[in-house]
């Protein structure tokens, strides 16, 4: 089974973000043999490439990443995370589901499609990075910026993120919420706990503001997006001594926001609350990316046709979950969806993908390609 062999080849490479460990060179060899024009686009120590088959017309793009998250404690794994192994009908290894299995399926589907349609209309492309699991600054974002500067467009894009929940292709992501991070420092005055009148405890000061921030309804969402949510991810204060009032509290939080809210509105609302509570503070923002949404159209129709042909039923559409590199690709103005294996084990100890799903995923991709090209979209 080619897809199994390809998945093993990729999993065996220790590409912990932002390292690529030769995954992309291996993929490039496969694509070059099919007649793709390859453009390596490294940036900031990150490996990226853009590959195109065909000379003109609309672009369909497979997008994904070769980097994986760290393994965690090796002794917690039942086998070496970088030695792919089959056990109980599953392929185990770091990246099996997120997303080296998808990359392998993309290659197999492309090989089969070009064998059937060597003179296809339009163009088929691959956009691959090793900076999706990390800071995501020099990866897909960089490639998209370069393509934009050259006036290039991606009309249709399938990102191989593990979108499935209970069974393969039961969920397709046709959008994602935006992501906005904040680092907040509440400034107080350090002192002895026995003399609180001579200090100013930032923990006590911030509690009313935190209650309002966490309890606020930022927006009601929309028919296509859940409401915007604020989650506190870390709070730190104190010297470690029980008799010292801290002078500073540092807090990190994240907004996953729908199109019903803007970055500017969220920032202004947070600052209004902090000012109204008369806090002394420093606040730094990091904007990870805007929300994006693909309405039903040629790409979704083709993907649903492919899923129904192979799985016997269509997928549910969703904009829930985290974010992905689709947020950058969508800025080029095309239709973007995410479709990949089940996500139950991603980022976990003993990450795995079912062999049955691994076998069917390239079939779903191939059927989707056929449907899109037959529709005249490409």
Image: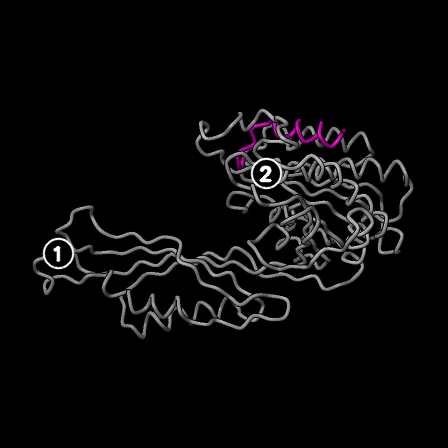
Depth check, front residue: 111 or 333: 111
Q: Residue at x 85, y 49 (%)?
A: 122
For numbered disc 2, what is the local secondary structure? Answer: loop
Q: Residue at x 51, y 66 (%)?
A: 228
For numbered disc 1, what is the local secondary structure? Answer: strand
Label of residue 327 in the image: none
Highlighted magenta segment, given as a residue range = 1-18
Q: Quadrant of the N terminus?
A: top right
Question: Dot 2: few (<14), some (14–19), or many (≥20) neighbours within 10 Å?
Answer: many
Q: x%, y% of residue 155?
A: 76, 55
**Residue 317, above or below 117:** below
Outermost bottom residue: 276
Outermost front residue: 88
Outermost left residue: 194
Q: Is 330 inside the magenta-drawn segment?
A: no
N-term-proximal mark, 2 vs 1: 2
**Residue 10, above or below 276:** above
Q: Is 7 inside the magenta-drawn segment?
A: yes
236 to the left or right of 307? left
Find residue 277 and report its image quarter.
bottom left
Q: x%, y% of residue 229?
A: 48, 64
Q: Residue at x 59, y 58 (%)?
A: 320
Q: x%, y% of residue 98?
A: 60, 40
Label of residue 191 in the image: 1
356 to the left or right of 279? right
**Residue 331, above or below 20:** below
Judging by the rendered image, the residue that carries numbered circle 2 is 130
Gap between marks 2 and 1, in whole Å? 47 Å
Q: x%, y% of residue 44?
A: 54, 39
């Amino acid at each position: 089974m080619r897809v199994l062999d390809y998945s093993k080849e990729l999993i065996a490479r220790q590409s912990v973000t932002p390292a690529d460990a030769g995954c992309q060179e291996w993929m490039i060899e496969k694509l070059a043999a099919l007649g793709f024009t390859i453009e390596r686009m490294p940036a900031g120590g990150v490996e990226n490439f853009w590959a195109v088959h065909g000379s003109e017309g609309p672009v369909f793009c497979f997008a994904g990443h070769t980097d994986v998250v760290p393994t965690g404690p090796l002794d917690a794994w039942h086998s070496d995370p970088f030695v792919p192994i089959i056990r109980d009908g599953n392929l185990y290894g770091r990246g099996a589901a997120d997303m080296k299995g998808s990359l392998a399926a993309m290659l197999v589907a492309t090989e089969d499609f070009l064998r059937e349609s060597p003179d296809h209309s339009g163009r088929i492309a691959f956009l691959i990075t090793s900076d999706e699991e990390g800071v995501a600054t020099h990866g897909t974002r960089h490639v998209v910026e370069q393509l934009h500067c050259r006036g290039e467009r991606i009309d249709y894009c399938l990102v191989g993120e593990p979108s499935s929940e209970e069974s393969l292709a039961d969920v397709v992501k046709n959008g994602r919420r935006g992501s906005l991070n904040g680092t907040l420092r509440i400034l107080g005055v350090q002192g002895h706990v026995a003399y609180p009148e001579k200090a100013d405890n930032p923990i006590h000061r911030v509690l009313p503001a935190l209650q309002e921030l966490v309890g606020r309804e930022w927006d009601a969402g929309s028919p296509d997006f859940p409401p915007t949510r604020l989650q506190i991810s870390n709070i730190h204060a104190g010297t470690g001594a029980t008799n010292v009032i801290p002078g500073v509290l540092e807090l990190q939080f994240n907004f996953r926001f729908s199109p019903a809210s803007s970055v500017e509105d969220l920032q202004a609302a947070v600052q209004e609350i902090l000012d109204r509570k008369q806090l002394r503070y420093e606040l730094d923002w990091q904007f990870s990316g805007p929300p994006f949404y693909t309405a039903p159209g040629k790409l979704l129709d083709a993907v649903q046709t492919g899923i129904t042909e192979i799985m016997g039923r269509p997928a549910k559409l969703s904009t829930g979950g985290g974010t992905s590199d689709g947020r950058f690709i969508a800025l080029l103005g095309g239709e973007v969806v995410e479709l990949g294996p089940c996500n139950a084990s991603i980022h976990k100890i003993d990450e795995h993908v079912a062999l049955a799903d691994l076998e069917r995923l390239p079939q779903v991709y191939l059927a989707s390609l056929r449907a899109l090209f037959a529709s005249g979209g490409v």
